[in-house]
C-alpha cells in the first residue's frame, strides 16, 4: 500500500505540474499575441528620444537615419529586417521550449527550462515585446513573470542539469538577481543600470552572472557524472558563443573608429547582432537536454576554438599591415596596403590554420589524435642513455603528457626473493591518484609473458577513456613492455648480484666461524689430551723396568685417553659433514637418523621417491640438517605420538616434516634451531617455513632449488642405494 500510495502521489504531482505549465504557457502566448502587433508597428517609425529610454531596442533612432539614406535602405525595409530578426529569435526560444516539453514533460527540470525559454521568447529580450498595458489582472500576472524570470534564470544556472543546487549554498546567489532586478526597476534615469558607465556595468554583469556560472564549473569538476558533463559542455558552448559574439561586436568600434559615424553600416547591426547572440543559447540548452549524445561536443568546441582564434589572427594581421604601414608612411586609405594585406593573408592562411588546428588538438586531446608523434616521443625516451631506474619514470611522464591524464603508473613484478615467495611488486608513477577504483589497468605482454600493468586514471571523476585514448595506448603498450622487460632484467641482475655478495659474505663468515670452532676444539680439547699422552708415555718409559705394575696402569689410562681423542676427532668430522651421507647416501642416512629418534617412543615414517637426480653435497647437507633439527624439536617439544618425513622432487627438493603434537604456541619466538633451518634454506636460494597444521601438529616445509646433473655417466640415485 505504501508503494502504491507514493506512486499515486507522484503521478498526481506530475499531472498538476503539467497543468500549471500549460496555464503559464497559455498566458505567455496571450502576452505575445496581445503585444506583438503594436510592437511590429513601432518598428516602422523612427524613435526621436535621444536617450533611447522610451524606444524599442529594435527600433531605429533619428540619429541612425543617415545610415539608411547612405545605403539606400528605406525605413520600411529596415523595419522588416528588424522584425524578421526578432521573429527568428522568438520562434527559436518558444520552439525549443515546446520541443523540450514534448519530449521530456515527465521531468521537473525540463518543465522548468522549457517554461523559462518560452517566457523569454514571449516577453522578448529585456521585455521589448511589452508595449501595451493589459487588463489589470493580466498586468499583475505579467509583472509577476517579469519579476520571477530573472531570478529563475539564476536558479537555472545553479541547478542545471539535474535540479539540485551544487554546491548546496548556491541558492543564496539568487539574491544577486533579486538585487539586480531591484536596481533596474527602482533607480530612475539616468541612474538606471542600463545607463551605468561601461566598466561599472560590466563589473555588475560579471558579478551576477559570473557567480552563478562558477557553480557550473564547480559542478563539472566536483560532482557531475560523465553524462552531466556532456550536458554542461553544451550549455557552456551555447552561452560562450553568445558572449563571444557580443564582446566582438562591442570591441569593433574601439578598433575601427569610423564605425562611430552616424552614417556607418554598423549603426544598423543591432537587430542582427541581438538575434545571432541569442540563438546559440536555446540551441545549446535544447541539445544539452535532448541530443547531447548525438554530436561530439569536444569536436564542436575544437573546431569553434580553431576558427575563432584563426579569425582573430587574420583580423589582427590585417590591422597590423594596413594601419601599421599607413601610420609609418603617413598614407591613409591606400588601396595598395589593403591589397598587400589581403595577399599576405591568402598566402599564410592555410599554414596558419593547420598550425592552429594542431595546437588546439594538442591542448585538448594531447597526442591521441597524432599517434605517430606519441610513438616518436616514446621512441626518443627509449633511445636516451638513461639508467633503468630513470627510464620508466620518463615513460610514464611521457604517456601522461600525451593523453593529458592526471595519473599514470607502471606496476611490475621484480625478481622473486626466494622460491615460492611472493614476487616483489614495484610501482613507477607520475601524477596523483585520487580514486584507484576508476583506474584502467592494461596488461603489458612481452614475448608471451605478462611483465606488468599500465595503470591510467581518467581525466575527471566518473569520466571514461575514449576509444581514441585506448587505441593510442594499445600502440604504446608493446614499446613500454620492452622497457619494462629490460628494467626487470636489470633489477634481476642487481638483486642476483646483491644475493651473490650476501652469499659470499655468509660463506666467509661461516668459514671463519667454523675455523674458530675447530681451533677452539683442537686447542682446548684434543690438543691438551694429546699433550698429556706424551707425559703419560714418558712416565711409562721410566716405570716400565722398575715398577711394571705402575707402568701397566699408566698404559691403561693412555689407552682410555686415546679412545677419547679418537671420539673427539670423529665428533669434529661429523660436525663438518655426517659420514653417513657419504657412506650410505641421503635416504639411508635419513632412515638411520629416524631409527635413532624412534627410541623416544614416537612412531616416525619416511616417505621418499623411488629415485632422485644426483644432488649437490650442499643440498644433501641442508636436507639432512633440516630434517635432523625438525625431528629434534618434535622429540623435545611437540609431545607428539607420530611424525612423518616426506621428500618430493619437483623443480626443487621439497622437504616436509609433520607431527600430530600440540603445535607452536601463539607467541613463539624463533630460536637457534628455527634460524638454522631458515639460514640453510636461504643460503641455497630456497625457503623454509614453520607453522601449525589446521587441526593439530606442526609442519616444517622447505624447498631447496637445484640444477639437474646432465652428465651421462651419473645415474639417478635409487632409494636404498649406497653412494
Image (tube, rainbow, N blue to C red):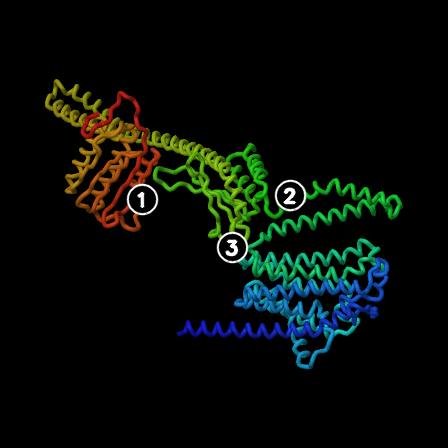
Bin the neighbour count of mark 2 within 10 Å (Cα to Cα): few under 14, some 14-19, many 20 and up.
some
Left or right: 515 as drawn, with respect to 224 = left
For residue 447, what is the image quadrant? top left
- Front-most of 236 and 134? 134
Up-down: is 254 above or below 717?
below
Residue with the mark numbered 3 = 462
> Mark 2 against mark 3, which lies toward the viewer?
2
At x 78%, y 55%, the residue is 252
Residue with the mark numbered 1 = 670
**Secondary structure at numbered mark 2:** helix
User: Which numbered dot is residue 358?
Assistant: 2
Q: Is residue 145 visible from the viewing direction of this image?
A: yes
The quadrant in which the C terminus is found is top left
Whichever of callouts 2 and 3 sits on the residue coming sooner in the sequence is: 2
> Mark 2 against mark 1, which lies toward the viewer?
2
| Residue furthest to the left | 549
User: Could you tell me how far apart the alpha carbons at marks 1 and 3 are, in whole angstroms?
Assistant: 50 Å
Return the x and y of residue 448 as percentages of the image width and height.
42, 36
- Front-most of 323 and 380? 323
**Secondary structure at numbered mark 3:** loop
Up-down: is 292 above or below 489?
below
Left or right: 694 as drawn, with respect to 493 = left
Whichever of callouts 1 and 3 sits on the residue coming sooner in the sequence is: 3
At x 39%, y 30%, the residue is 504
In contact (CB < 8 Å): disc 1 and disc 3: no
Whichever of callouts 2 and 1 sits on the residue coming sooner in the sequence is: 2
User: Could you tell me how far apart the alpha carbons at marks 2 and 3 are, in whole angstroms?
Assistant: 28 Å
| Residue furthest to the bottom | 136
Return the x and y of residue 270 as percentages of the image width and height.
76, 62
Left or right: 56 as drawn, with respect to 282 = right
Bin the neighbour count of mark 1 within 10 Å (Cα to Cα): few under 14, some 14-19, many 20 and up.
few
Amino acid at each position: 500500500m505504501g508503494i502504491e500510495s507514493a506512486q499515486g502521489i507522484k503521478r498526481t504531482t506530475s499531472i498538476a505540474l503539467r497543468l500549471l505549465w500549460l496555464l503559464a504557457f497559455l498566458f505567455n502566448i496571450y502576452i505575445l499575441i496581445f503585444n506583438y502587433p503594436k510592437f511590429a508597428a513601432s518598428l516602422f517609425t523612427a524613435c526621436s528620444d535621444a536617450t533611447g529610454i522610451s524606444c524599442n531596442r529594435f527600433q531605429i533612432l533619428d540619429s541612425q537615419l543617415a545610415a539608411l539614406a547612405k545605403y539606400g535602405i528605406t525605413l520600411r525595409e529596415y523595419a522588416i529586417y528588424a522584425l524578421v530578426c526578432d521573429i527568428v529569435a522568438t520562434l527559436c526560444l518558444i520552439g525549443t521550449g515546446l520541443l523540450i516539453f514534448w519530449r521530456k514533460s515527465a521531468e521537473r527540470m525540463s518543465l522548468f527550462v522549457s517554461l523559462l525559454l518560452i517566457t523569454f521568447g514571449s516577453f522578448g529580450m529585456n521585455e521589448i515585446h511589452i508595449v501595451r498595458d493589459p487588463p489589470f489582472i493580466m498586468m499583475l500576472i505579467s509583472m509577476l513573470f517579469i519579476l520571477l524570470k530573472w531570478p529563475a534564470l539564476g536558479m537555472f544556472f545553479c541547478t542545471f542539469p539535474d535540479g539540485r543546487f551544487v554546491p548546496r549554498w548556491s541558492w543564496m546567489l539568487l539574491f544577486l538577481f533579486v538585487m539586480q532586478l531591484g536596481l533596474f526597476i527602482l533607480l530612475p534615469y539616468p541612474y538606471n543600470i542600463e545607463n551605468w558607465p561601461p566598466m561599472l556595468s560590466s563589473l555588475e554583469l560579471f558579478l551576477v552572472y559570473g557567480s552563478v556560472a562558477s557553480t557550473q564549473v564547480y559542478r563539472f569538476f566536483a560532482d557531475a557524472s560523465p553524462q552531466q558533463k556532456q550536458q554542461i559542455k553544451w550549455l557552456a558552448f551555447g552561452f560562450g558563443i553568445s558572449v563571444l559574439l557580443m564582446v566582438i561586436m562591442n570591441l569593433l568600434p574601439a578598433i575601427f573608429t569610423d564605425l562611430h559615424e552616424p552614417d556607418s553600416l554598423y549603426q544598423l547591426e543591432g537587430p542582427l547582432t541581438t538575434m545571432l547572440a541569442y540563438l546559440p543559447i536555446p540551441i545549446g540548452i535544447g541539445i544539452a537536454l535532448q541530443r547531447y549524445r548525438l554530436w561530439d561536443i569536444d569536436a564542436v568546441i575544437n573546431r569553434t576554438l580553431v576558427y575563432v582564434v584563426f579569425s582573430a589572427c587574420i583580423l589582427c594581421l590585417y590591422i597590423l599591415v594596413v594601419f601599421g604601414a599607413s601610420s609609418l608612411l603617413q598614407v591613409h586609405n591606400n588601396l595598395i596596403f589593403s591589397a598587400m594585406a589581403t595577399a599576405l593573408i591568402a598566402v599564410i592562411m592555410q599554414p596558419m590554420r593547420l598550425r592552429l588546428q594542431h595546437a588546439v588538438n594538442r591542448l585538448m586531446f594531447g597526442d591521441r589524435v597524432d599517434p605517430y608523434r606519441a610513438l616518436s616521443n616514446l621512441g626518443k625516451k627509449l633511445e636516451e642513455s638513461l639508467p633503468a631506474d630513470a627510464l620508466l619514470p620518463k615513460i610514464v611522464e611521457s604517456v601522461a603528457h600525451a593523453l593529458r591524464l592526471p595519473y599514470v603508473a607502471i606496476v611490475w613484478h621484480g625478481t622473486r626473493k626466494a622460491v615460492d615467495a611472493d614476487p616483489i611488486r614495484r610501482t613507477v608513477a607520475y601524477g596523483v591518484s585520487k580514486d584507484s577504483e576508476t583506474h584502467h589497468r592494461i596488461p603489458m605482454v612481452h614475448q608471451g609473458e605478462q611483465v606488468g600493468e599500465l595503470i591510467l586514471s581518467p581525466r575527471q571523476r566518473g569520466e571514461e577513456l575514449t576509444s581514441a585514448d585506448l587505441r593510442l595506448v594499445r600502440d604504446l603498450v608493446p614499446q613500454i613492455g620492452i622497457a619494462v622487460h629490460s628494467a626487470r632484467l636489470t633489477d634481476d641482475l642487481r638483486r642476483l648480484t646483491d644475493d651473490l655478495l650476501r652469499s659470499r659474505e655468509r660463506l666467509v663468515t661461516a668459514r671463519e666461524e667454523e675455523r674458530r670452532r675447530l681451533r677452539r676444539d683442537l686447542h682446548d680439547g684434543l690438543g691438551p689430551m694429546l699433550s698429556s699422552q706424551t707425559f703419560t708415555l714418558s712416565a711409562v718409559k721410566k716405570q716400565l723396568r722398575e715398577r711394571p705394575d705402575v707402568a701397566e696402569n699408566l698404559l691403561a689410562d693412555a689407552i682410555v685417553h686415546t679412545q677419547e681423542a679418537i671420539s673427539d676427532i670423529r665428533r669434529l668430522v661429523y660436525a663438518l659433514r655426517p659420514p653417513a651421507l657419504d657412506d650410505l647416501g641421503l635416504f639411508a642416512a635419513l632412515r638411520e637418523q629416524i631409527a635413532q629418534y624412534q627410541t623416544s617412543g614416537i612412531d616416525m615414517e619416511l616417505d621418499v621417491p623411488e629415485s632422485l637426480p644426483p644432488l649437490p653435497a650442499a643440498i644433501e647437507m641442508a636436507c639432512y640438517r633440516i630434517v635432523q633439527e625438525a625431528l629434534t624439536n618434535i622429540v623435545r617439544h611437540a609431545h607428539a605420538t607420530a611424525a612423518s618425513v616426506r621428500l618430493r622432487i619437483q623443480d626443487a627438493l621439497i622437504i616436509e616434516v609433520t607431527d600430530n603434537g600440540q603445535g607452536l604456541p601463539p607467541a613463539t619466538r624463533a630460536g637457534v634451531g628455527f634460524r638454522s633451518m631458515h639460514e640453510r634454506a636461504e643460503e641455497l636460494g630456497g625457503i623454509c617455513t614453520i607453522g601449525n597444521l589446521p587441526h593439530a601438529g606442526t609442519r616444517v616445509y622447505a624447498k631447496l632449488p637445484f640444477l639437474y646433473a646432465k652428465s651421462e655417466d651419473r645415474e639417478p640415485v635409487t632409494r636404498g642405494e649406497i653412494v
